[in-house]
Amino acid sequence: MSSKDYDKLGLKVGLEIHQQLDTGKLFCRCPSVLRKDAPDFVVRRKLHAVAGEEGEVDVAAMYEAERERVFEYECYYDNTCLVELDEEPPRMINEEALREALKIALLLNCKIYPIVQVMRKTVVDGSNTSGFQRTLLIAHSGWVETPHGKVEIESLALEEDAARVVKREKEKVVYRLDRLGIPLVEISTAPSITKPEQVKDVALKIGEVLRACKVRRGIGTIRQDLNVNIKGHERVEIKGFQEPKMMAKTVELEVERQLAELKDGKKEGEVRAALPDGKTRYLRPLPGRARMYPETDLPLLRIQKKMIDELKRELPKLKSEIVGELKKKGLSGELIKVVLPHLEEFEYLAKVSKNNVLIAKMVGVWRKELEAKSEKAKGEVGERLNADVLARILEKVEQGKVLESEVKQVMEKVLEGEDVEKACEVKRVSQDELREEVLRLVKEKPGLRENAYMGLLMGKFKGKINPREAAQIVKDILSSEKANESA
Ligand SMILES: [Zn+2]
């Protein structure tokens, strides 16, 4: 299907990303650590339907409670406390998590709310011991740029992750509380993505922002959902993408599915699960809007302008910006790739020398090559040739005591255990020998240009002379010859 057809079909896609932050938990002081071993203790609970603010009982909650389901919560002494068990009120918000969420909001060009109310979102499946999830809407109206145009970031919220299901039986669900309370950033775009390929662009762009900040990595740390609909069909929510690469295909197939449904006179929205091959599977009907109540145990949060200004100054650079800067510094695509994992060292060394290509080779290429060659220094190259050592070698290059062509050899000597100073004393042709050779050349081939004599010298003493010194000697001798002639 061409993109023109998607325009005609009125395709609308919205993306929602949930990303765990790499900080402690949001409303207690437990670490965000998931455990694989047996729990220290287990707590059994039954869920009771609770009347909301208006006195009405949540129908869905009642439905769950009527089924007399028992929830079991697996706990650990070191990463779950009374807050996760809902036996103690929440503590003040984790400042580090808040700052990371604000950084992400700023990098996504969002506007930040000056006052934030922590809200309780009703959750009835038992995955929250309290029966609700705490969430804070902190920013809105941002945007990301894609090759197909800007896409609006509608909202950015900071919330607590739910407990995870370990076992599901007929009358019982077993949850593990270690994940409950881990900070999550929830990013929602407007449903203004209009082409299947654009979905991936948006996901990758947001992913780039997230990876520049302190986020948890690995399977399960990011969850991505899509809302898809064409004209005449209600919104279908597709859950559970781990990676953006299948999104375009999934949207294409979903459009086909909705078209077929419309032909049969069906148009109902629903929740579906994303499958690895791009297809989807029915999960459940669309839920109504989540019920929200203010969290009465916590005060209003004021996001100070001073804090925002401070965060703006320390915003991390995105990978695409870094690559652009390295390109400007004269590095090839190949060199950029090998430098990226050593960026801090590269930037440190760029203050010692302006020779960016040489530095890139030192940190990104030669260290690896030398380590592969060395028998006794395996695994020690990072220490023996650390940034401080490389800086001392670079200083010698700057002073003209070590030639660029000799640097790798010097590094090898240091790696094999030689002292840096000593390794930098490269054996060279003496000044007297050089002078003798130049005089001989001038006598043998008189009348050549300076550069031509230099070429002959370099050819003869490959790597054993300092070109700067040699050029000076050639210049001196030629000008004294000239003086003699005119005299
Ligand atoms: Zn805790």
Image: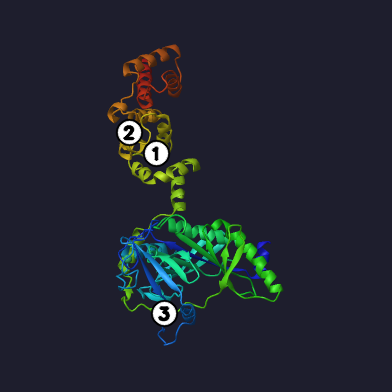
Using a 10 Å C-alpha cutoff, classify the residue at mark 1 as few (fewer than 14 neighbours), some (14 to 19) or many (20 or more): many
Image spot of residue 438 (x, y percent): 39, 16
Quadrant in the picture for residue 300? bottom left
Quadrant in the picture for residue 245? bottom right
What is the CA distance from the residue labelled 3 to the residue labelled 1? 61 Å
Looking at the image, do the residues carrying marks 3 and 1 touch, with CB atoms under 8 Å apart? no
Q: Is residue 222 visible?
A: yes
Q: Is residue 236 visible?
A: no
Is 251 positioned to the left or the right of 487 in the image? right
Q: Is residue 320 above or below residue 475?
A: below
**Residue that carries the numbered disc 2 in the rendered image:** 393
Using a 10 Å C-alpha cutoff, classify the residue at mark 2 as few (fewer than 14 neighbours), some (14 to 19) or many (20 or more): many
Nearest the camera: 454 or 375?
Answer: 375
Q: Which structural element holds mark 2?
A: helix
Q: Is mark 3 within 8 Å of ligand 1?
A: no
Label 3 vs 1, first from the N-terminus: 3
Mark carried by residue 48: 3
Image spot of residue 197 (x, y percent): 59, 59
Mark carried by residue 363: 1
Nearest the camera: 283 or 396?
Answer: 283
